[in-house]
Amino acid sequence: MGNRSRCCFIFFLHLPPKIYTNMDKNEVREVIAKRVAKELKNGNVVNLGIGLPTLVPNYLPHDVELVLQSENGLLGVGPTPEAGKEEAHLVNAGGGYITARPGASAFSSAQSFAIIRGGHVDATILGAMQVDENGDLANWMIPGKLTPGMGGAMDLLVGAKHVIVAMEHMAKGAPKILKKCTLPLTAKGQVNLIITEMGVMEITPQGIVLKEIHPEFSVDEVQTATEATLIISPKLKSMAFSFT
């Protein structure tokens, strides 16, 4: 048999760089919730999204009392009830059990959304799958996967006076803060502030400004974990937390 030429193909798998942290998942969520709590003022009417945002009231200063709203029709939401003391008729928009504070008011879903659309909610705190440098947010579906629908997030994003996104900085090693969202949008240009375990970022007409950074990370590490190009504030400072 004659000589045969051989061809060898080499494939390179490009993986996103690993950002190392000493925090576990619970500590990451705690850091985010503590920092979000500093954005809220006494007497604010606040709507909390499901998941991580519901941790925020646990870290409010003692002199700050919020009026929590649930879009299914309650103003004056109280803490999560103890096991065995749940009231079947008191649930939030996500179906979780809640309590009602003294003086709370219950009303129809239509009235609840009139409060939101009328601009009477001071702040809403939501999670996100993606946020981009224009303040666009995607947090309701991944194409091809079953979803219950967009829900009240679209109203909260355009109706609340201040929109805070509280989320982990990356998902499975991929950035969540992008130049442009690739998932279906919940709303365009409505996000004011992004708070992650790595820092605090403000959406401005010029782009995303990194205002605070967690001392465990460097600016280069935060940028590496972010697809959008960050503008580094000349007054960049260490991330501040709220403790009770």
Image (cartoon, helix red, strand yellow):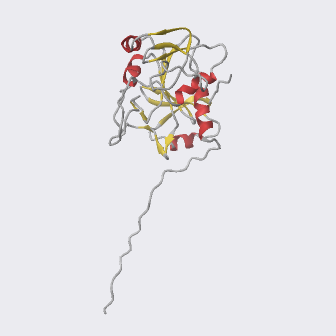
Q: Quadrant of residue 129?
A: top left
Residue at 53% from the left image edge and 27% from the top image edge:
53
Picture coordinates of residue 107 (x, y %)?
A: 42, 10
Q: Quadrant of the C terminus?
A: top right
The quadrant of the picture occupied by the N terminus is: bottom left
240 displayed left or right of 231: right
At 62% from the left and 30% from the top, the residue drawn is: 239
Q: Nearer the viewer, residue 152 or 120?
A: 152
- Which residue is at a point 62% across and 44% down the rendered structure image? 21
Is residue 82 found left or right of 14 in the rendered image? right
Locate residue 43: give its quadrant: top right
| Residue nearer the viewer, 192 or 48 | 48
- On the image, the x and y values in percent for residue 240 come to 64, 27
> How far from the left and from the top, in percent, is residue 30?
61, 32
34 vs 205, left or right, is right
* 89 vs 222: above or below: above
In x, y percent, where is residue 38?
A: 60, 21
Residue in the image at 47% along x and 42% along y: 175
Q: In the rendered view, tell whether residue 84 sits above or below residue 229.
A: above
